[in-house]
Image (spheres, grey):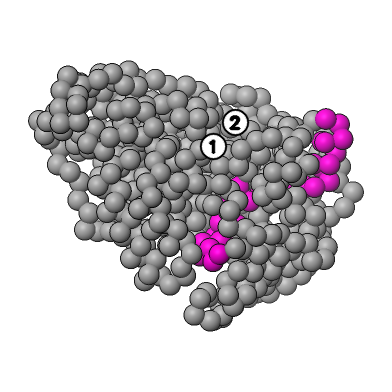
Amino acid sequence: MSPGRRVRLCSLGSLLLGIVGTISSVAFAAAELPDTTIVFCSEGSPAGFDSAQYTTSVEFSAASYTVYNRLVEFEHGGTKIEPGLAESWEISPDGLTYTFHLRHGVKFHTTSFFKPTREFNADDVMLTFQRMFDPDNAFRKAYPVQFPYFADMGLDKSIEKIEKLDPYTVRFTLKTVNAPFLSELAMPFASIISAEYADQLMKTGKASDINLFPVGTGPFIFRSYTKDATIRFDGNPDYWKPGVVQVGKLIFSITTDAAVREQKLKQNECQVMSYPRPQDIASLQSDPQLQLPHQVGFNLGYLAYNTTHKPLDQAEVRQALDMAINKKAIIASVYQGAGQLATNPMPPTQWSYDKELKDAPYDPGKAKDLLAKAGYPNGFDITLWAMPVQRPYNPNARLMAEMIQADWEKIGVHARIVTYEWGEYIKRGHAGEHDTMLIGWTGDNGDPDNWLGVLLGCSAVNGSNLAKWCYQPFEDLIQKGRTTTDTASRTKYYTQAQKLFKEQVPFTPIAHSTVYQPLRKNVTGFKIDPFGPTQFWGVGMQ
C-alpha cells in the first residue's frame, strides 16, 4: 500500500460491514509526459462513448477506463475497491445511507469542443446519477437513452434519493439494503460526466454529442474517432493520480480480423492486441519480441434462449436443445485447449458457485423424445445468432454456431445462422429479436448478483437478460440475496437459484475461457483486467 493512503474496514453492526476509504489530498500539477505512443489493435468499433448506456468491454475499453473515472474504483488489475473521485465514504449502520466525500482539485478535460471553467464537484455526481434515476431529469429528456446496467441491477428501484449536501459531499439513500452497491458504483456505467459540458450541449441542442465527443476526468483525453478505423487519445498531463499516465498518445487501431491483429503486432504496427485466436497461441509464445501474459478468465460463453418466443417458452424444448449440443466437441474445436466446460451460470471462481450441479448428458435421442413430448415430433425452424467479433468468452462464434446448427439438425431443429455488426447485434438482442443467441459475460464486480441478477433477473429483461426470462421463484431468491449482507445466507439463496436455473435452462452455459494478452516485449506495467476491458493505466514503453 502506497504512502499517504489508508483504507480502514470497521464493523457497523450485524447488518453490514462499513467501509471507509481515504486518500490524502494533494495539489495536482501538470505532469511531463513521455513522447511515446502506444497503438492498441482492438477487435471492434465502439457503439459510442457514453458509458451509462452500454454493457460490453468494447465501449468500456474505449471510454470508461480511458476518458472517465468513478466515485470508487477497482484497483488496477484486481477486484478490491479503492477511492476514486470520492476520497472517502461512510456507510450508515443500517446499510441504507452512503455518504461520499469528493476529491478536490480534479480537472475535467480541455478539448477542441469543450473548455471547462471549474473543477469537478458534487454537481457532476448529481447529474451522472440523476439522469439515470430521474425520468424527468432535463438532460435525460434532451438525450433519451436506455441505462441497462442501472436497471438490470435494480438501482432504479432500490435508490430512494440522491442529495448534494455541499459542493464536495453527496449522499445516496437506499430503500432496502443492497449488498453489492459499493462495488456497483465502481462499474463503468457509473462513470462521472461533466454537468457543465452537459449544460453546454443542451443549450446548443446537441445533447447526444456526449456519446460522440466524451469529456471526463480520466487518464486519457479523447481527440477523434473514425468509425471502423481509429480512436485517438492524448495522455492527460493534469491527471489527479500520479504515475497512471505513462505515454503521450494512445491510439486504438480497430482491426476486426484476429489474424491481421497478430500480423500487426509482430510487425510492431501495434504494441498491444486483443483476443488472439486459440490456434495462434503457440506462435505468439515462441516470438522473442513478444510477451503473452494470461490468466483464467472470470467469464462465461453461453447460448441464450428467448423465452418469449414459441416454442422456447417451454422448459422441455429448452432442455431438449440443451442436451442436443455436443459441448465437449465445441470446447475442443472452438477453444482448442483454452476453454473449460461450463455448467453453471457463473464461473467456478465466483463465490457461491454450486459445485454439485451437473450438466444433462449429451443425448440427441432423449432430446428428440423431449421435443415430441413438448408437441414437436418433427422439430421446428429457428434463428441462431452468432457474434461478428471475438470476445474473451468466445474466440469463434461463427464456428460455434455452425456446430450447434449441425447438432440441432440431428433432432429435426433447423437453425438459420444470423449475424449483425456488433453494436447492432447487442441493440437487437436487447430488443428481443433473436430466437437463440450466442453471447457471454465477463464479471463486472465480483458479486454473484452480477451474474444471476443481471443476466437472469426480472428487472434485466430489457437489458442484459437476453433470455428474457422472468421466473418468480428464481427472482425471489435473487432479491433475498441482494438485500442480505450475511455471506452464508447469500450463498444459500444463490445455490438454490442455480438449481432452479439448471431445471429451467433459460440459457445453455458452454465454456469459460483462458484470457491471453499479447504484448510487445517493451510494453511495461500492463495488467490483465479480471473484468474484461483493456486498460492502459500505468502502461508505458521501455
- Residue 227 painted magenta: no
Report the residue at 77% width, 52% height from top.
Answer: 124
Residue holding disc 1: 58
Q: What residue type is labelled 2?
A: Ala
Assess whether mark 1 and mark 2 are in contact (beta carbons under 8 angstroms): yes
**Which stretch did the figure color magenta?**
176-205
Q: Position of residue 191 (x, y in %)?
A: 66, 49
Report the residue at 24% width, 47% height from top.
Answer: 503
Q: Residue furthest right?
A: 117
Local packing at callout 1 (Cα closer than 10 Å; few below 14, some 14-19, many 20+) is many
Q: In this view, does 46 lie to the left or right of 126?
A: left
| Secondary structure under the numbered disc 2 in the rendered image | loop
Residue holding disc 2: 47
- 524, 22: nearer the viewer: 22
Q: Position of residue 517 (x, y in %)?
A: 44, 43
Report the residue at 58% width, 24% height from top.
Answer: 228
Q: Which amino acid does label 1 sit on?
A: Val
Position of residue 95 relative to residue 28, above or below, is below
Q: In this view, does 399 lie to the left or right of 534?
A: left
Position of residue 157 relative to residue 302, above or below, is below
- 162, 254: nearer the viewer: 162
Local packing at callout 2 (Cα closer than 10 Å; few below 14, some 14-19, many 20+) is many
| Secondary structure under the numbered disc 1 in the rendered image | helix
Numbered disc total: 2
